[in-house]
Image (cartoon, rainbow, N blue to C red):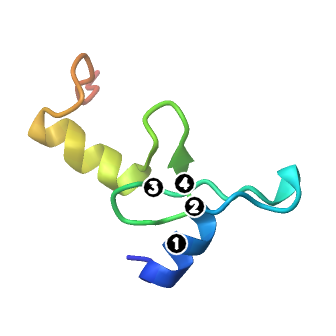
Amino acid sequence: MAKTSVIARSQKTPKFKSRVVRRCFKCGRKRAYMRDFDVCRICFREMVHEGHIPGIKKSSW
């Protein structure tokens, strides 16, 4: 979980467009971020298992 100061800093509009840091809205993680769902891979997995994201299920073959 990221510190609240780091999360607050990333929510400000940056001076330059290339400095945008996208973070998970749930935990603040910046790595393994999924733009389509606005969460990181860990939170994505938890939300899918809980059924918060409709239409997505664990694959098995």
Rounded to the nearest angstrom, the CA distance separating label 2 from label 1 is: 5 Å
| Front tag of 4 and 2 | 2
Residue contact at pointers 2 and 1, CB within 8 angstroms: yes
Quarter of image, res 50: top left
Residue annotated with mark 1? 8
Residue annotated with mark 3? 24
> Where is residue 2 shown, x and y percent of the image?
44, 77
| Front tag of 4 and 1 | 1
Say what secondary structure mark 3 lies in: loop
Q: In this view, does 60 lie above or below 17?
A: above
Residue contact at pointers 3 and 4, CB within 8 angstroms: no
Rounded to the nearest angstrom, the CA distance separating label 4 from label 1 is: 19 Å
> Where is residue 45 shown, x and y percent of the image?
28, 46
Residue annotated with mark 4? 32
Residue contact at pointers 4 and 2, CB within 8 angstroms: no
Residue contact at pointers 4 and 1, CB within 8 angstroms: no
Amino acid type at mark 4:
Ala
Rounded to the nearest angstrom, the CA distance separating label 4 from label 2 is: 18 Å
Quarter of image, res 31: bottom right
Amino acid type at mark 3:
Cys
Which sits in the foreground, 50 or 9? 9
Of callouts 2 and 3, the N-terminal one:
2
Quarter of the image containing the N terminus? bottom left
